[in-house]
Image (tube, rainbow, N blue to C red):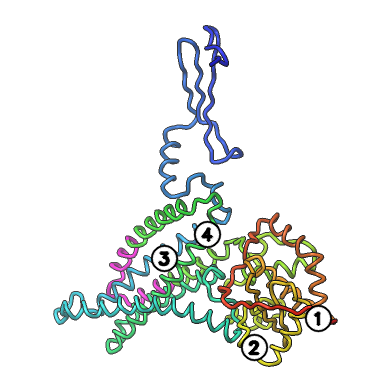
Amino acid sequence: MEARGRGPTPHQTVIVEEWSGSSSEKLSLTATISSTSSSIAIRRFSGRFNLAWSRFLSAFVPEGFPSSVTPDYVPFQIWDSLQGLSTYIRMMLSTHALLSAIGVGANSATVIGATFQWFLRDLTGMLGGILFTFYQIFSTMIYQKEHTLTSGSNLDCNAKMWRLVADLMNDLGMLMDLLSPLFPSAFLFIVCLGSLSRSFTGVASGATRAALTQHFAVQDNAADISAKEGSQETVATMIGMALGMLLARILVGHPLATWFCFLSLTMFHMYANYKAVSSLSLNTLNTERSSILLQHFMLTGQVLAPEQVSMKEHVLPLWTNPWDWRDTKILHTRVHLAVKVSSLNHNYMMELFRCMGSYYKKAMYVLLEKNGIISVVMHKDSTHTDALQSFMHALVMLTLLDKKRAHAASWSWMDKHYKDFLLKLQSSGWKTERLLTHSVVWKADWICGPTDEKIK
């Protein structure tokens, strides 16, 4: 094997630079190593303190931070840590009240009695978690069968909303624990109600946390992000529990002060949660974000960035604001995706056959419109991309309902603009592989005879 070069000559100096960083755009010079034939000299540019600090920080932030996560990771984690801190402080106050109500420290209390009450409390929480999961499945079935105006029940579809709802349910559970000593005759019922409320929190918070972790992981580092999030939560837990124990000891015998601190921390907790979910700029397409994007594109020909859409989408459920519910711009609530064909009435069925033999003869879906509501029938061979296209097509048709021949007008728009719309979505950072919605369970197949003609 032929050598590619010679070793350093007695008068030649070799200099090696050491760089550190998670990407080529964010490198910093950490050391230079110069070598001659007789000596090696090392010059370091980062002190021992900086090195120790970086190692300490690596236990709490993902490797390669900040380029290994999305830009909204930092503001979300700051507000999430603050709300977690207030949660653990209030948890100590509510637990102190709960143990006092059970009889800890009282001569009349029995160990078996306290154990039984605690067992019922935990059992109710476990059953509540199962019931909440069942509710998710049942509400999806109702959506598909009865065409309700919900936007699907999967937690992935509305991660921001369910994250907020989960923490509000946790607040309600701790409130029940603090209330329990005030009503001795209904103590067990109130405690079980609080445990039931917290069980909903565990299911919804865990599921939405998984969805958010996938959102933050821009380098397929979801496991690392989850591990570091656990470290952050552990620190917040320790600080919160220490402050909570101190506060509980100070407030012993002062019920009014206890309630004031609890309610003040609860208000801060709700505010921090709202700021946390509002800071998220999710780049996945659910029904509401798709509606916002499409309507803006049809008006301007431009696509909004995820940060712009996050300021427009609803964080709270629509029923909390009846004025928004009546807003004609909220088109996604008027689309029923993947309906069950056998559940359609006679008029709908006749319209379905007419559409299948005309505009949707070779399509992977059929759109049925009645009273400003569009039902979508998916083809047996349809894919995730077909589901996304069918939903966008339904939104286009709703926008063009005031025109004659809405089916033809919407197909014309889709043929001219849909591919360009998808390309602009992808260039703006949106994930267009699928639509986040309820599971598409019901599908259909249709075969049209050769004598069928397109209905004009």
In primary-sequence order, the first of circles 2 and 1 is 2
- As shown in the figure, which amino acid type bears the numbered disc 1? Thr
Q: Give the range drawn in magenta.
A: 242-264
Kind of element beneath mark 4: helix
Q: Does the magenta stretch include residue 250?
A: yes
- As shown in the figure, which amino acid type bears the numbered disc 4? Phe
Residue at mark 2 to residue at mark 1: CA–CA distance: 26 Å
- Which quadrant is home to the C terminus? bottom right
- As shown in the figure, which amino acid type bears the numbered disc 2? Leu
In primary-sequence order, the first of circles 3 and 2 is 3
- Return the mark for residue 86: 3
Label 1, residues with CA under 10 Å away: few <14, some 14-19, many ≥20 = few
- Return the mark for residue 451: 1
Q: Residue 402 versus residue 355: which sits nearer the camera?
A: 355
Q: Indicate the position of residue 259 as horizontal and vertical percent values.
A: 38, 76
Q: Which of marks 4 and 1 is in front?
A: 1
